[in-house]
Amino acid sequence: MADSQPIGVFDSGYGGLTVLKEITGLLPGHDFIYLGDNARAPYGSRSFDTVYRYTLQCVEWFFQMGCPLVVLACNTASAKALRTIQQSDLPRINPDNRVLGVIRPTTEIIGNFTRSRRVGILATSGTVQSGSYPIEIEKFFPDIQVYQQACPMWVPLVENNEYDAPGADYFIQKDIGLLMKQSPAIDTIVLACTHYPLLMHKISRFIPPGVRLISQGEVVARSLSHYLQRHPDLDGRCSKGGRTLFYTTDSTEDFDNHAAIFYGRAVQSRHLAV
Ligand code: DGL
């Protein structure tokens, strides 16, 4: 993609591909580069400092690749690194470029879905500990009560191809049960980890009837499309050749084998050494 200015889409591993799939569906003319930091995944159990350092390193790489805009399609990176990158690093590295996350697009619309004003968040331990969802939802909808449940086994189940196995049922049922126990009035649950859509068919089986599940791919894609409409200068800097490149920091063979499950079609990745 010589001389192109693609939109960067980042995740700790494969999960962001569920978001990229929706984004490319909505913006088929734009160029994209996806980077999965598979060599250092999962991020969900890592410290703030580590997630921040890894994420910043990857954002700097996207900028070197010519990206004017990077989407952190990872809740953990959005929760633990985005604000520092936006406020401290961006003005120093490249004040004209932009880095967006997945938490704000989700929290700013959540009030449109819940009637009981009780919302559940299922996420990695890191995202839950950061408190980002309750903090952001409070800004937009102070009347909503937020309940969180960390699901530390869900990403490993997905990353290890066990998402369809009967063993996965135990962890999914358990964590949903722990969430609903906090408030049976929860009527909307956010799948606040980009890996979780792969578990959707099992999750749907264990949520009580009438509870609505929000998965982020479509929400983030719509929000990005609106953002580009509101920022025509930035959109003008994004190249539009309809191409998507894939990079992984780990084995390209493993990435290509897994990625199709998340992205819905075959991909051929390149390696990035970190
Ligand atoms: N997919 C990432 C998220 O949305 C988490 C995966 C990980 O733990 O690395 O939070």
Image (tube, rainbow, N blue to C red):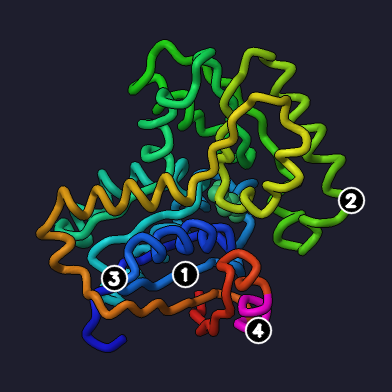
Q: Which residue is mark 3?
A: 30
The local secondary structure at tag 4 comes to: helix
Magenta highlight range: 252-257
* Tag 4 residue: 253
The verdict on label 4 being within 8 Å of ligand 1 is: no
Q: Which mark is residue 70?
A: none
User: Disc 4 marks which amino acid?
Assistant: Glu
Of callouts 2 and 1, the N-terminal one: 1
Give how far apart the Cα atoms at labels 4 and 3 are.
Answer: 26 Å
| Helix, strand or loop status at disc 2 | helix
Q: Which label sits on residue 35?
A: 1
Which of disc 3 and disc 2 is earlier in sequence? 3
At a point 58% along the width and 69% down the height, the residue shown is: 264
Tag in front: 2 or 1: 2
Look at the numbered disc 3 and give the secondary structure of its residue.
Answer: loop
Q: Earlier in the sequence, mark 4 or mark 3?
A: 3
At 36% from the left and 71% from the top, the residue drawn is 32
